[in-house]
Amino acid sequence: MSNPALAIDCPNCSLVTPRFLQYCHNCGYSLWPSGEYATAAFIAWRDHDPDRIMARRFDLETPPPEPDDNVLDDVARAHELGLHLFPRSAWPFPICVGFFFLFLALVPFPTGWRIALGIIGGVVLLTGVVGWVVLEDTRMYEESASVGHGGHGASVDHDGAHGPAHSADRREEK
């Protein structure tokens, strides 16, 4: 059992087939005398190396090892792929509840109920929209503005004028 491969070339048809099956998938050539021999050989092969513990008899390749940490960092993965993820927010839920009450107000209930449902739906919907657009959005842009400037770029001169940092000093050096 020195060959660590799970797939072999069939001696009859030369196509790749799982090594520990009794018959070739393509031509039906008998690779093992019986299924019990194939199973015993597979168990011995699998138990020989702890990296093979997730392998199955029907596989053509050993499965990749499990990642050590179970935490998947979506933000880092998106950054690697060049994608921008918006921050998570709970505000879409109240917006949906507001729409629910607004659409419920369209059902032919008595007029007082319809007006009450419409007002409740409108207030909840507007609260959700204001919370998501004003509160969440401003918090997101405050973080990006502080990261974007980070103390670099514009500075205040001694006389209070804003401008590029030490621009006059740079011109004199040249």
Image (tube, rainbow, N blue to C red):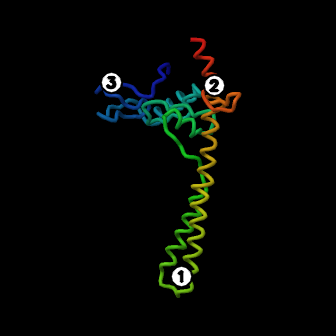
> What's the residue type where badge 1 is placed?
Arg
Residue, disc 1: 114
> What's the residue type where badge 2 is placed?
Ala
> Which residue occupies 61% across, 64% down?
127
Residue, disc 2: 165
**Which of the two labelled residues, at mark 1 and mark 2, occupies the earlier sequence position?**
1
Instruction: Give the CA separation, mark 3 to mark 2.
Output: 76 Å
Closer-to-camera residue (80/166): 166
Q: Residue furthest bottom?
A: 110
Q: Which mark is residue 11?
A: 3
Q: Is residue 80 left or right of residue 32?
A: right
Q: Quadrant of residue 130?
A: bottom right
Q: Position of residue 38 (x, y in %)?
A: 46, 32
Q: Which SS class for mark 2?
A: loop
Instruction: Give the CA separation, mark 3 to mark 1.
Output: 78 Å
Q: Position of residue 81 (x, y in %)?
A: 48, 34
The mark closer to the camera, 3 or 1, is 1
The mark closer to the camera, 3 or 2, is 2
Q: Are marks 1 and 2 in contact (CB under 8 Å)?
A: no
